[in-house]
Image: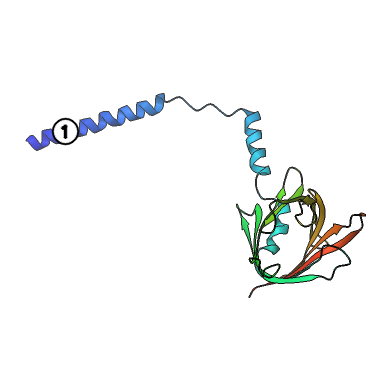
Amino acid sequence: MRRAVRAAVVMVGLVVLGVGLASAQETKPAQPAMDPAKQAAMEAMQRLGSPSEGHKALEPLAGTWSYTAEWRMSPDESPQSMTGTAVNTLIFGGRFLKQEVRGQPMEEGQPPFEGMGFTGYDNLRKAYQTVWFDNMMTGMMVGAGGFDATTRTLTDEGNFSCPITGETHRWYRTAWTVVDQDHTRYESYSRTPEGREFKSMEIRYTRAP
């Protein structure tokens, strides 16, 4: 008898609780609809802040590579050479390409070369943006450019502070070409004091097996 009474009390309690929850849900005010202008702004932000067609040009550059580099500070100098490795990684959902480069010492007695760079595509400016820094200088190379789909070449132009010449805004331009699936070529150009342009660096990358 007591068990029956207890069961009846429990059932009544559950019914009361269910009615209360249902009533609370019914009386809960509905969320106001988002303002159309705000909704449009949110959608635009989502679209412009996400990887686009322009970011696809970065994909063939990702991977682990070995490289051979030659460079010179003036058109009359004999080029110097260096070999090393590069690990290029797409980060933040494919928005940016991160470069981590290691190489032989630039000169005897110096530490091994280390550098890092980032390349991305700005959907609003419709331009590629780059930044590069390494253990041979205290400034950053900053530039912007475009992409030629016909030649599969990513171009860049900017300036940096050069500890060799003492220039605070040394001009440069580059061309990074996808030769094929396993090879890319990076070319950098500078200017003489008279304004004559010359190739200051060429790096040939081969994808690691």
Taking the spot 80% from the left edge, 65% from the top edge, the residue there is 201
**Does 184 sit above or below residue 96?**
below
Residue 82, percent across and down?
Answer: 72, 71
Under mark 1, the amino acid is: Ala
**Does 1 sit above or below residue 58?**
above
Q: Nearer the viewer, residue 118 or 191?
A: 191
User: Disc 1 designates what residue?
Assistant: 8
**Does 134 sit above or below residue 80?**
above
- The image's colour scheme reads rainbow
In the rendered image, is residue 166 in sight? yes
In the rendered image, is residue 66 in sight? no
State the residue lying farthest toward the bottom. 209
Residue 174 position by quadrant? bottom right
How many marks do you count on the picture?
1
The local crowd at label 1, few if under 14, some if 14 to 19, many if 20 or more residues have their Cα within 10 Å, is: few
Q: Nearer the viewer, residue 17 or 45?
A: 45
State the residue lying farthest toward the front. 109
Residue 64, percent across and down?
Answer: 63, 68
Looking at the rendering, in which quadrant would you find the C terminus? bottom right
Q: Nearer the viewer, residue 151 or 18?
A: 151
Taking the spot 16% from the left edge, 33% from the top edge, the residue there is 8
Residue 42, percent across and down?
Answer: 63, 36
Looking at the rendering, in which quadrant would you find the N terminus? top left
Question: Quick check: 162 left or right of 34?
Answer: right
Residue 199 position by quadrant? bottom right
**Does 12 sit above or below residue 206?**
above
Question: Quick check: 93 left or right of 24?
Answer: right
Q: Nearer the viewer, residue 175 or 90?
A: 175
Q: Secondary structure at mark 1?
A: helix
